[in-house]
Amino acid sequence: MSTDRRKLDHIRICLSEEVEAGSSGFEDVVLIHSALPEVDLEKVELKTRFLGRRISMPVFIAAMTGGHEEARRINENLALAAQELGIPLGVGSQRAALEDKSLAETFAVARESAPEAFLIANLGAVQFAGGYTVREAERAIEMIQADAIALHLNALQEACQREGDTNFEGVLNGIAELCDALDVPVIVKETGAGIAAEEARQLQEAGVSAIDVGGLGGTSFALVESYRGGEPGRCFAAWGVPTAVSVVECASSVDVPVYATGGIRSGVDVAKAIALGASACGVALPLLREAARGSEAVLTWLRRLERELRVAAFLTGSRSVEELSRARVVVLGRTREWLEARGFVR
């Protein structure tokens, strides 16, 4: 099956089927309420930095789609919202557009609609162990005039995909070569199964600029592939490291920024992730569904999340994102058990 057809399958499944599985772990994370916040709610400062760029809040639109003409409108609506709010936007895998240049416009529309936004190009890391070179990465960056590139790790999805690329030998070396050769920051991101401390340290040593944990608890691409006939998919729907756990493991183990994606569904989730060590949080599936309706729907959803984040910061006595990163937090339940078993205690 062609790459663009597969991307269309993914869009349609995510818009019409139940594709979330597992727990992100944020239900076990409790921010301690401050009865005396000594903060003016309306003066809470949510602006922060994202790989050197000032952004309006520690939130970005995570990679989700592209590579099919039907995705053009979705990417345009997401980009319009990113431009309006001053937050980053990551596009979906650009592999299809490298294979078929006629699809490049489904990605290029992001820069056309968001001339000032921080845009993140996207390719599969496994491709750089199987024939792709620095030139393919440069073409993806040029396609959207990207400010950074994300290399996604999706071993679980590939293993559950009928036409999956499952030879991951040499992927880390490929990542290191790109980090050394490219002029823009390299983000490595998982796609729903999380990143543990050991792999985070390997990625830092390879030279990555940031790690996006892409943890369990949001969209399960194993489940998505099961709708396409991927036989093992349902068995592995809840496989992976929960997002909250992955944030703690990675943030405790590396010095590069750690981003939290995977089950971020509210401003309170963002606040919890920041308190656990994340620098910013990404949202995908909810915004994909809003983008199918229009850019205003995306803006409405994100403005609600922004207000929730502001209130959460206020209620912890935090005047800024930096202060929120030091907010009092308690971790309970299975998440605490996991972190204790792994030797991470906060």
Image (tube, grey):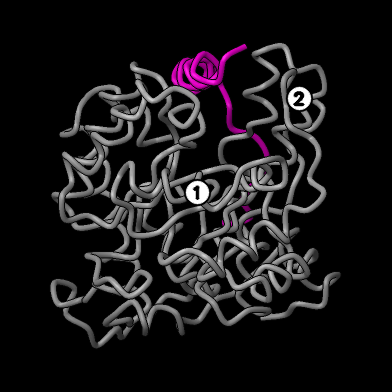
Q: Kindly identify the residue that appears in the image at 40 percent across and 59 percent down.
A: 148
User: 36 or 121, which lies in front?
Assistant: 121
Residue segment shown in magenta: 1-26
Q: Quadrant of residue 163?
A: top right
In the rendered image, residue 234, in percent from the top left (x then y), is placed at: 76, 24
CA distance for labels 2 and 1: 33 Å
Q: Amino acid at mark 2?
A: Gly
In the rendered image, residue 296, in percent from the top left (x then y), is placed at: 15, 34
Q: Earlier in the sequence, mark 2 or mark 1?
A: 1
Circle 2 SS class: helix
Residue 301 covered by magenta stretch: no
- Front disc: 2 or 1: 1
Give left or right: position of 243 versus 100.
Answer: right
Residue 283 in view of the camera: no
Q: Kindly identify the residue that appears in the image at 78 percent across and 31 percent down.
A: 159
Residue count near mark 1 (Cα–Cα under 10 Å), binned few <14, some 14–19, many ≥20: few
Q: Amino acid at mark 1?
A: Arg
Tag shown at residue 233: 2
Residue 14 in view of the camera: yes
Q: Is residue 33 above or below residue 285?
A: below
Residue count near mark 2 (Cα–Cα under 10 Å), binned few <14, some 14–19, many ≥20: many
Q: Kindly identify the residue that appears in the image at 22 percent across and 65 percent down.
A: 56
Tag shown at residue 135: 1
In the rendered image, residue 238, in percent from the top left (x then y), is placed at: 73, 38
In the rendered image, residue 2, in percent from the top left (x then y), is placed at: 57, 14
Circle 1 SS class: helix
